[in-house]
Image (cartoon, rainbow, N blue to C red):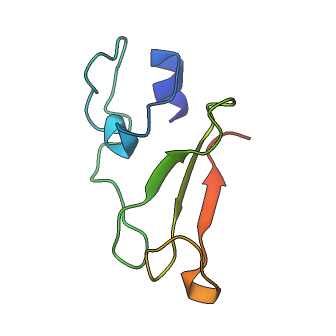
Amino acid sequence: MGEYRKDTRSFQGENEGLEALRSAPARTSNWRGPYYPRENPKYPWGRPYIYRIRHAATDVPEIGTFGANGKPGGKDLDEDMFENVVR
């Protein structure tokens, strides 16, 4: 995602998601990908990773999962796990 941001001067939006690393989103200039040549991975419970921008003011995306049950919230294996893309 760092290369995508470097080329396009921003991270992809939530609507484009991780697929923007494989194919150019509409109305995106300077896209020089693909930045991730394979199919986007799935997390251990078989669902795609979630790409979101939690704080619009910072424009820093997060990637993660909603845990085993695929629903927000939860404990143990159902706990949400997200990580900022940029630190």
Q: Residue at x 29, y 38 (%)?
A: 22
Q: Position of residue 59 (x, y in %)?
A: 61, 31
Q: Position of residue 83 (x, y in %)?
A: 64, 55
Q: Quadrant of residue 14?
A: top left
Q: Tally the numbered discs.
A: 0
Residue 67 vs 17, above or below: the answer is below
Q: In front: 45, or 7? A: 45
Q: Position of residue 23 (x, y in %)?
A: 25, 33
Q: Position of residue 77 (x, y in %)?
A: 57, 86
Q: In front: 18, or 6? A: 18
Q: Residue at x 34, y 35 (%)?
A: 20
Of the 4 image quadrants, the one containing the C terminus is: top right
Please, which residue is most extreme toward the right here?
87
Using residue 18 as the reference point, say whether residue 59 is left or right of it.
right
Residue 25 vs 63, above or below: the answer is above
Residue 8 vs 24, above or below: the answer is above
Residue 53 vs 57, above or below: the answer is below
Please, which residue is most extreme toward the bottom here?
76
Q: In front: 27, or 40? A: 27
Q: Residue at x 51, y 70 (%)?
A: 66
